[in-house]
Image (cartoon, rainbow, N blue to C red):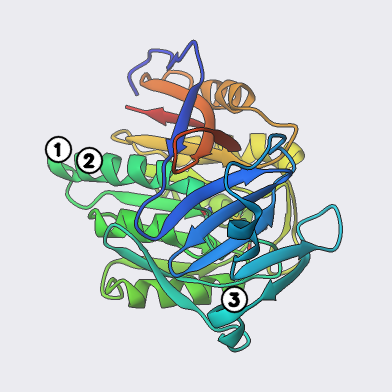
Amino acid sequence: MSGAEPEVAELPSVMRTRGWADYGLVDSGHGRKLERYGRFSVVRPEPQCLWTPALPAARWDAADAVFDPTDEEDAGRWKLKGPAAGLGNGETWPLSWRDVKFHGRFTSFRHLAFFPEQAANWEFLDAAVRAAAGAGGGQPKVLNLFGYTGVASLVMAAAGAAVTHVDASKRAVGWARENAELSGLSDRPIRWITEDARKYVQRETRRGSTYEGIILDPPKYGRGPDGEVWRLFEDLPELTRLCAGLLSDNAKFLVLNAYAERISGAALSGLLAEALKGRGGRIEWGELALEQEDGARAIGMSFFARWQR
Ligand SMILES: C[S@@+](CC[C@H](N)C(=O)[O-])C[C@H]1O[C@@H](n2cnc3c(N)ncnc32)[C@H](O)[C@@H]1O
């Protein structure tokens, strides 16, 4: 520990994802967004897009997949046409970000089995792991909690980290392992753990394990495999404190991300600053945004705070 308080950025940062070969925010407006996921164009509800779309209606009507929400939450149904309609139930198609490959899927929760705005975090994690490994850190040990389909885990593994990936859902961990195979990273040191994130961290704390980097992207509400209830506002403070306690003396980063409506980057930075008292380093905070391909607009998607040293 350095003894100094972490320096907290005075202003928020907007980490914009501009799209890449396999993803783009093509247009937005009238409460919806038009995106490209590899070979498919997709329309999804996005109530914050209060403006008028730039592209003609015909471009939107030509989309391969439209998500039809059934309620205020994320559930609903996909209407597929053209080649997308030819996909069998649960069938996937390959996507990639840099060297990491993963499957696109039309999930019943309106997303495509990964979150494109997370590319800003992947970029950060990639650089942070490479810097840690390059600074004589050997193979940095990193932890990805609530890791879902594992893109962040694979980005860190590809950058040279020994990764522990934790998620409550057996199915999500299965998909993450498939993504590792697709990426040619099955032989990398990645531990795939299906467990309640809090229970896992409590156990690691008792064992005295340490990590050089941790990322956590908890949902607002979730359940562990044995029905353990996760509530963001009640449970994040304690989990963050425990995660801070798992950081090694040589630790390089701790990244918090959250999608809940009543959270903010400023709030997450306050939590991190308290949990990391005496560790020095710097805390950046703000939001992750998707930028339209024409550069005309960006949509705020989630909030983050990250400590780095
Ligand atoms: C918002 S997603 C995380 C997205 C992921 N970080 C990414 O970028 O792809 C939430 C994940 O948390 C998992 N989850 C929910 N409750 C959990 C719990 N109590 N312990 C561990 N994982 C949990 C879900 O299974 C889901 O995969």
Q: Helix or strand or loop: what does disc 2 sit on?
A: helix
Which of the 4 quarters of the picture holds residue 240? Answer: top right
Are discs 1 and 2 less than 8 Å apart at CB? yes
Residue at the far right in the pictured view: 71
Any mark on residue 132, and which? 2
Query: Marks 3 and 1, how far apart in space?
Result: 36 Å
Q: Nearer the viewer, residue 289 or 168?
A: 289
The kind of residue tagged 2 is Ala
Mark 3 vs mark 1, foreground winner is 3
Query: Marks 1 and 2, how far apart in space?
Result: 5 Å
Is residue 47 placed above or below 297 in the rendered structure?
below
Any mark on residue 171, and which? 3
| Whole-percent x, y for residue 230 in the image | 73, 51
Is residue 79 placed above or below 229 in the rendered structure?
below
Query: Marks 3 and 2, how far apart in space?
Result: 32 Å
Q: Is residue 162 at least partly visible in the picture?
A: no
Q: Of the residues under marks 3 and 1, which one precedes in the sequence?
A: 1
Any mark on residue 190, and which? none
Q: Of the residues under marks 3 and 2, which one precedes in the sequence?
A: 2
Q: Nearer the viewer, residue 175 or 195?
A: 175
Q: Which residue is mark 1?
A: 135
Residue labelled 3 has its Cβ within 8 Å of some atom of ligand 1: no
Q: Is residue 266 at least partly visible in the picture?
A: yes
Residue at position x 36%, y 61% from top?
Answer: 154
User: Where is ligand 1, by quadrant?
Assistant: bottom right
